[in-house]
């Protein structure tokens, strides 16, 4: 079962437990005093809290594709909050070398275990998430190793940069290759 399917199953179980709990309550006088909106809000809040929780992931389930992309149980995730240098489509040797170092370091962090993967919304136009028009069809996520965001660790080690997107779009990526200026 994939991480996403596990999260959906957990949300559904929580929703059903809350629904049963509300139905079994014997104190109808108290229920009559609570406006129906409060009950619905409580269910929605519990549902949202369950979605926000990260799911534990076994290191053996994680395949590191590059410094900011992983595959977990068949699903590909772009890690948010960072931009690591490219390895496959690098524009220069220094970008490729730094990208390989970032990939190697991410593999080390994954191997330590204690992983939690939180699926988060991608910064895409409405209705495009999960399609090739949004993030090349990848999901978005935050990966933590032993409670620390791996993106923050890669940034602190100089192997990636901070890269923060808005709700529906991302800023242009900065180049990793040095530019040479030609002067006359």
Image (cartoon, helix red, strand yellow):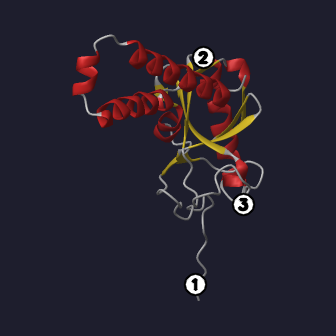
Residue at 63%, 39% in the rendered image: 102
Disc 3: CA contacts within 10 A as few (<14), some (14-19) or many (>=20): some
- Residue 134 appears anywhere in the view: yes
Q: Position of residue 97 (x, y in %)?
A: 69, 46
Residue at 57%, 84% in the rendered image: 183
Q: Position of residue 40 (x, y in %)?
A: 37, 34
Q: Which element is circle 3 on?
A: loop
Work out whether 124 lies above or below 23. below
Work out whether 14 lies above or below 42. above
Q: Which element is circle 1 on?
A: loop
Disc 2: CA contacts within 10 A as few (<14), some (14-19) or many (>=20): some
Q: Is residue 85 left or right of residue 44?
A: right
Q: Nearer the viewer, residue 114 or 19?
A: 19
Would you name the residue on which mark 2 appears? 113
Q: Is residue 45 left or right of residue 138?
A: left
Q: Which element is circle 2 on?
A: loop
Q: Nearer the viewer, mark 3 or mark 1?
A: 3
Of labels 2 and 3, earlier in sequence is 3
Of labels 3 and 1, earlier in sequence is 3
Would you name the residue on which mark 1 appears? 183
Q: How far apart in space, not on screen, are marks 2 and 3 (Cα)?
A: 33 Å
Q: Nearer the viewer, residue 127 or 146?
A: 127
């Amino acid at each position: 079962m994939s991480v996403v399917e596990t999260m959906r199953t957990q949300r559904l179980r929580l929703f059903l437990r809350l629904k049963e709990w509300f139905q079994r309550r014997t104190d109808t006088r108290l229920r009559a005093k609570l406006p129906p909106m409060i009950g619905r809000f409580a269910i929605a809040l519990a549902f949202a809290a369950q979605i926000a929780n990260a799911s534990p992931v076994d290191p053996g389930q994680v395949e590191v594709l590059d410094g900011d992309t992983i595959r977990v149980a068949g699903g590909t995730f772009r890690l948010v909050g960072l931009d690591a240098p490219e390895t496959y489509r690098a524009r220069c040797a220094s970008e490729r070398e730094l990208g390989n170092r970032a990939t190697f370091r991410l593999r080390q962090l994954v191997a330590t275990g204690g992983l939690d993967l939180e699926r988060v919304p991608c910064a895409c136009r409405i209705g495009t998430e999960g399609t090739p028009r949004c993030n090349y069809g990848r999901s978005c996520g935050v990966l933590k190793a032993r409670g620390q965001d791996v993106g923050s660790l890669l940034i602190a080690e100089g192997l990636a940069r901070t890269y923060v997107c808005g709700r529906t779009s991302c800023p242009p990526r900065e180049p990793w290759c040095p530019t040479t200026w030609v002067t006359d």
